[in-house]
Image: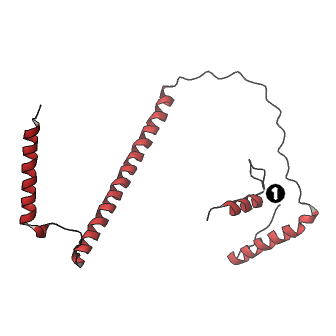
Amino acid sequence: MFIHPTLLADASGQILEEITEQVTAKPEKILQGTEKMDGTQIAAMTIVGLAVVFSALLILVIFLYLSGGIFKSAGKQKKSAPEKAAPAKPAPAAKPAAVRQPPKAPAPAAADDSEVIAVIMAAIAAMGAADGKQYKLHSVRQVTRRGSGRSVWAQAGLNDATKPF
């Protein structure tokens, strides 16, 4: 569709004239940016703004909750479908039993650790006295984390030193 440039100029000129007539006819309806709002307008604008923000957040929470439920149910269906359809596999041939070594006994506490053991026993006794019970200490052994090789106290110190504010 081709519009002649003079027709377009005439139409845009008419639109501009109509807008200027409306502006000059009712100047009190146009905000210039220098007017002051009264307390009710400020309160209304604040309430409307908060309502819009919280309704948008509520819609977002509902959307995430529903999409999480959809993905969980889809994951359950995918996991259960292969289990039902999988044919029974033949049992593997029996292998000779490997010789298992008995688990290592915990190393006895060294003589220089007697102070540490005494402190641990005192803490346990104090804890039992608070509960009205009497606890017994059966053994003391060092506990290490599986992958790091550090003792629990060393790992706690490392976590404390590197934890964000």
Residue at 10% in and 47% down: 12
Q: Is residue 3 left or right of residue 52?
A: left
- Residue 60 versus residue 99 in the image, above or below: below
Q: Tell me the kind of residue under disc 1.
A: Gln
- The C terminus is located in which quarter? bottom right
The x, y position of residue 54, in whole percent, is 33, 62
| Residue 3 as seen in the image, left or right of residue 106 | left
Residue at 6 percent across and 65 percent down: it is 25
In the picture, the quarter occupied by the N terminus is top left
Outermost residue toward the front in this view: 6
Going by the image, does 131 lie left or right of 138? left
Q: x, y (%) of residue 92?
A: 67, 22
Residue tagged by mark 1? 142
Q: Position of residue 153 (x, y in %)?
A: 76, 61
Query: For this rendering, which residue is in front, 154 or 70?
Result: 154
Q: Residue 103: x percent and y percent? A: 82, 45
| Residue occupying the point 33% across, 54% down | 59
Q: Nearer the viewer, residue 158 or 68?
A: 158
Query: Dot 1 lies on which element?
Result: loop
Q: Quadrant of residue 19?
A: bottom left
Assess disc 1: are there few (<14), some (14-19) or many (≥20) residues with their C-alpha within 10 Å of its C-alpha. few
